[in-house]
Image (cartoon, rainbow, N blue to C red):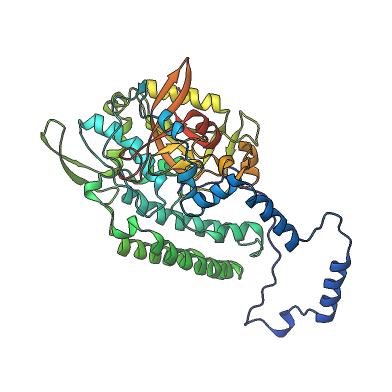
Amino acid sequence: MISPHLIPQQQPLDERLVVHENRKETDYVYIDSKKLDNMDHSLENESKPYSQDLSIATTESWEKELMDDPKNMLALSALSSHDPRAILTQRSTMIADSQIFNIKISFEGSPITNQKSSGRCWLFAATNVFRVGVMRRYNLKEFELSQAYLFFWDKLEKANFFLENILDTADEDLDGRLLQELLKVPVNDGGQWDMAANLVKKHGLVPQSLYPDSFNAMNSSFINSVITTKLREDALELRKLASKSSSARDSVGDLKNKMMQEIHRILTITLGPPPSSREKMTWEYYDKDDKFHKLDITPVDFAAELHSVEGLKANGGTNIDELFSLVNDPRNAYGQHLSVSRLGNITGMSPTRYVNVGMDIIKKACIDMLKSDLPIFFGSDVGKFSDRSSGIMDPDLIDYGLGFNIRLGLTKAQRLEANESQMTHAMVLTAVHVVDDKPVRWRVQNSWGENVGSKGWFVMSDRWMDEFVYQAVVDPR
């Protein structure tokens, strides 16, 4: 899962009456039931010209009108006994969205990766971009970077980031919008490109063979649940201590370190101890010519190879460290720098930043990247008008009008405003088909394994890109 919010939404919270058992009697709020009854009656009697009950007679007339049309009887028979998406899928769209492209990077990287039952798509997409340079640098046929290694450190860094935010907001109202938003999801699997870049800068990279996925990396719900509960408890305890006298506040740091040690314990036991980022690891491998090699190097230095002289040469002169995010958020003016307050993973490192531009600029930058033989990390709303089994993403794929005689016509901006769409998944672009200087479809490397799409590869129509792609990470050159 990719962290979805481009811009924090100013949404009012529901008013709540919270009564705690340990409060004194004078702390309770009493409500006069008679006054409440009178209030209900006054609301019932208040004239509301826009208010209208849903009558049984009306629904019966709707049903009669519906069933009198033979086309609706056919729709009922088909759509009530089968998956509606399968029935409404347009065969012509599936034929048009073929895996044929006239601009394609020469080396896409393999094998197809699989994030399993976790929300690590952004780490898989990022490492799938990073690995292309590594594979070129070391002349590899197949290779994976350890997503679990970055996952371990992301969880630990996010826990620290959360507790630092709790201390930074110690004077805020616990029932306020900010604290409730922070407490809603203290640590999840999602992330952004800048967060992946921060992890690599601080902790480096590791071949997957040296730190493979554990059960809990592939199935992250358990550790997310335990860590979330623990961090919420820790947050309340830290706030309580921070509100006391200055002498008591001096022990906040010690208490937070103890809490972080407990989170580290949970992660180490469930994911396994990761390689040290500062100590040399020994990586033994065969290159694509079947020659044996042995490399002793730290994870940090291994990552730094991507922007060494050899690494820059492998990436056509592109410095992976300098890639940045373009986003398309039509609610806001183009040309602006955007950021999300308190979205991040490593305290003191780069915040999550974007440049808001039109889709024409994003697509041009992506085509330029592909022509330069480079893969592209991108973020989208993958669940919209897409089919997992065929691997096709196209607004014309499913004809809802045919089945229900309705029109779904929100604009991209309106979908964002109504919470109908958001950035939910990260993948990688490796090819595009261009006709008359205009893109028609794009080749997508997903991280859902080889049993979906075309052996793990998806195809995205250009119109789907316009509507449901929100981010692309490109070379500023």
Where residue 9 sits in the image (x, y, percent)? Answer: 64, 48
Count of all numbered marks drawn on residues in the image: 0
> 424 or 385: which is nearer to us?
385
Extreme residue in the top direction: 436
Where residue 27 sits in the image (x, y, percent)? Answer: 72, 79
The answer to whether residue 285 is seen in the rendering is yes
> 52 or 193: which is nearer to us?
52
Vertical comparison of 469 with 84: above or below: above
Q: For this view, does 92 lie left or right of residue 110?
A: right
Q: Quadrant of the C terminus?
A: top left
Vertical comparison of 108 with 342: above or below: above
Classify residue 217 by image quadrant. bottom left
Extreme residue in the left direction: 291
Classify residue 369 by image quadrant. top left
> 292 or 431: which is nearer to us?
431
Where residue 155 sits in the image (x, y, percent)? Answer: 41, 55
Residue in the image at 28% along x and 51% along y? 276
The answer to whether residue 169 is seen in the rendering is no
Q: For this view, does 236 lie left or right of residue 292?
A: right
Classify residue 434 by image quadrant. top left
Where residue 4 sits in the image (x, y, percent)? Answer: 53, 46
Vertical comparison of 393 with 67: above or below: above
Residue in the image at 33% along x and 36% along y? 130
Residue in the image at 30% along x and 36% along y? 131
